[in-house]
Image: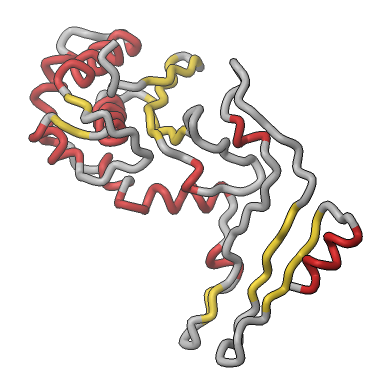
Amino acid sequence: FNTLKAAEQSGADAYVIGNEGDRYSKYHTTIWGRRNVQSMWQEDNAGNVNDYRERIGIQLQSLDLHISTLDEEGLRKAWKDFNSDIWQHNKLGRQFSDNSFFYPVLDSLMYGVGDPLLKAKRIFAYIRNKMHCNDKISAIASRDITKVWENKDANAAEINVLLVAMLKEAGLDASPVLLSTKGRLKATHDYPMLDRFNHMIGLLIVDSVRYYLDASGKY
């Protein structure tokens, strides 16, 4: 920790401490330090104060398992790759494939209705009123929507995935949308990090107008 002592003596605001570990370890640990950091406090209408704090975000670039090496291409993702991974993660994509279990209800809701926006309103009202949200905000639907349909009890992501599935089956342009709420760190434009997201809602597009829908709230 001689680097820290030198930084303190020089008055430097930022420094790096290198710790080589003990003689049994071949790994190198780097610790970043920061001095003279200005104090911060929460202000009204300022959003999440943590979004304004100085920080260093660490993202795993490669992993050596001594069996095979996962390189940068396999670990670091661009937004388009992130979107593809999310579609496959927890089998989100399959939630929109075979949903014949709700066809009878959907047929009754769509009977005699031609206007796309009215179709969406009927589906939204049905899901919002029939499903009970257990107050768990989540970015991931952990169960198949068949189970959600049967139990009528689900987290916010599961309810909204079900909503999007019904909208799509009705022939509407709908997609799930990941969100970062006020209490969470903002998602960055530069690099996707799943832990920045904590909520999922639905997006409906009718006549080039975007409607963001959340059927998990009784309002």
Q: Is residue 74 above or below residue 64?
A: above
How many marks can you see? 0
Q: Is residue 80 above or below residue 46?
A: below
Name the residue at 28% across, 34% down.
136
Which corner quadrant holds the N terminus? bottom right
| Residue 120, image x, y percentages | 30, 15
Q: Which quadrant of the structure image shows residue 148? A: top left
Q: Is residue 179 left or right of residue 6?
A: left
Q: Is residue 163 left or right of residue 45?
A: left
| Residue 42, image x, y percentages | 60, 25
**Depth check: 38 or 75 in front?**
38
| Residue 67, image x, y percentages | 46, 87
Name the residue at 62% across, 48% down.
191
**Depth check: 27 or 10 in front?**
10
Q: Which quadrant of the structure image shows residue 21? A: bottom right
Name the residue at 40% across, 22% down.
204
Please name the colour scheme applied to the rendered image: secondary structure
Which corner quadrant holds the C terminus? top left
Q: Residue furthest right?
A: 10
